[in-house]
């Protein structure tokens, strides 16, 4: 190859290089890759909502059962699909799940011949109201490994309605749980090693309440704490049936604003039982103390399902709170 051919080849290579670099510069001028500091369209991705706070504790099962509606419970068994797996009639055959007639108060594996899961077989004792409520809340948590595919029912009122319906499916329905006992069982028990505690961890009324035997209601009210009484109405489940605000509506029971010193049967329009209507006079401190101690003893035949408050100090605190619910509270009795 002579020098002329070499010069041509070199020139071709040089020209190709110039063309390559030049096209790059031209392309950069035409298409600017610079990313702007701010986007033309700002797409905002919402943050996940903060986790909700802890749910308020459920009312005790006794409180829920006091106002439970079996008709609503029966409707719920259909709405929740229970009827697809269970029968409810006496002597009914098992389906995917066992027949549920007479289940309340019966052993966990109550239906002879039905193949219960080992998870449920391991449960000792009977189907109490509280056990059934826990089961309906989330079967897989109550008995891990259960064959029950039902996810559960979060609403405690709906669970109570279903349980009340199941309670009626019996030749001899189980008595409803006492409201006070259910409320007391939900409270933290005293330390068994504390002074005054009995062998089962329950303190005697006098030791727990600090009221000496034989103290009058006047003496107890002199040292009563209305704030403690307000807290007691919540612990005992009184707010499940009563309202306490001025002008509040009746619930299962009457509104209690201004009750101290008012006539027995004080709320106009409320359908009091004949047992309570038969009591004349007013709600004095002494009368309220007797009523709270045992409603069924004060007015036999009353509609009030509450069993009563055994602790005299606690009764005095509740009465002191009720006394405060008035524009002009009644004078305290002289000790």
Image (cartoon, rainbow, N blue to C red):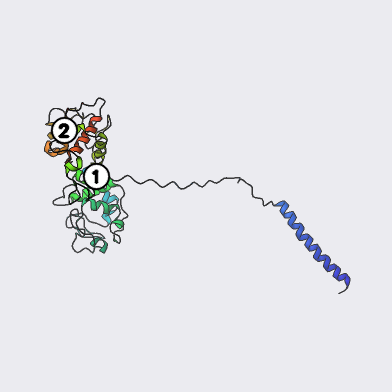
Please give left or right for residue 293 compared with residue 325 in the image. Answer: left
Image position, residue 185 (x, y; %) = 22, 47
User: Is 222 placed above or below 126 here?
Assistant: above
Between circles 1 and 2, the one closer to the viewer is 2
At 83% from the left and 68% from the top, the residue drawn is 9
Q: Can I make out residue 26 in this image?
A: yes
Image position, residue 291 (x, y; %) = 15, 35
Mark 1 and mark 2 residues within 8 Å of each other at the beta carbon: no
Q: CA distance from mark 1 to mark 2?
A: 31 Å
Image position, residue 208 (x, y; %) = 20, 43
Q: How many labels sit on residues?
A: 2
Please give left or right for residue 178 compared with residue 37 in the image. Answer: left
At 74% from the left and 55% from the top, the residue drawn is 25
Pointer 2 residue: 217
Of residues 25 and 76, the one nearer the viewer is: 25
At 25% from the left and 47% from the top, the residue drawn is 186
Label 1 packing within 10 angstroms: few (<14), some (14-19), many (20+): many
Image quadrant holding the C terminus, namely top left
User: Is 260 placed above or below 18 here?
Assistant: above
Label 2 packing within 10 angstroms: few (<14), some (14-19), many (20+): many
The image's mark for residue 185 is none
Image quadrant holding the N terminus, namely bottom right
Of residues 273 and 213, the one nearer the viewer is: 213
Pointer 1 residue: 64
User: Is 61 placed above or below 145 here?
Assistant: above
Image position, residue 232 (x, y; %) = 24, 39
Of labels 1 and 2, earlier in sequence is: 1
Residue most toward the top?
Answer: 328
Choose top left, top right, bottom left or bottom right for residue 99: bottom left
Q: For the residue labelled by badge 2, is the local secondary structure a helix, a strand or a loop? A: helix
Q: Can I make out residue 300 in this image?
A: no
């Amino acid at each position: 190859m002579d020098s002329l051919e070499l010069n041509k080849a070199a020139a071709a290579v040089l020209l190709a290089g110039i063309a390559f670099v030049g096209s790059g510069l031209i392309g950069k001028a035409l298409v600017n890759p610079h990313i702007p500091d701010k986007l033309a369209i700002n797409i905002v991705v919402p943050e996940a909502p903060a986790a909700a706070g802890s749910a308020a504790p459920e009312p005790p099962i006794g409180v829920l059962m006091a106002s439970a509606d079996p008709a609503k419970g029966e409707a719920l068994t259909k709405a929740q699909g229970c009827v697809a797996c269970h029968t409810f009639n006496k002597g009914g055959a098992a389906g995917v799940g066992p027949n549920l007639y007479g289940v309340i108060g019966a052993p966990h594996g109550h239906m002879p011949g039905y193949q219960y899961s080992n998870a449920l077989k391991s449960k000792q004792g009977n189907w109490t109201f509280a056990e059934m409520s826990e089961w309906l809340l989330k079967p897989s948590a109550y008995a891990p490994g259960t064959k029950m595919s039902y996810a559960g029912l979060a609403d405690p009122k709906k669970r109570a309605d279903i349980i009340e319906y199941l309670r009626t499916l019996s030749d001899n329905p189980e008595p409803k749980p006492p409201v006070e006992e259910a409320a007391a069982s939900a409270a933290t028990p005293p330390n068994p090693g504390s002074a005054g505690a009995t062998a089962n961890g329950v303190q005697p009324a006098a030791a727990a309440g600090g009221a000496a035997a034989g103290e009058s209601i006047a003496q107890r009210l002199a040292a009563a704490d209305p704030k403690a009484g307000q807290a007691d109405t919540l612990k005992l489940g009184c707010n499940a049936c009563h309202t306490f605000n001025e002008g509040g509506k009746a619930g299962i029971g009457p509104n209690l604003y201004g009750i101290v010193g008012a006539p027995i049967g004080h709320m106009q329009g409320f359908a009091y039982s004949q047992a309570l209507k038969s009591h004349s006079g007013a709600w004095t401190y002494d009368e309220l103390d007797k009523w709270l101690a045992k409603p069924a003893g004060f007015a036999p035949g009353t509609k009030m399902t509450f069993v009563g408050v055994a602790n005299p100090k606690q009764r005095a605190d509740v009465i002191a709170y009720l006394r405060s619910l008035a524009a002009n509270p009644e004078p305290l009795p002289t000790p």
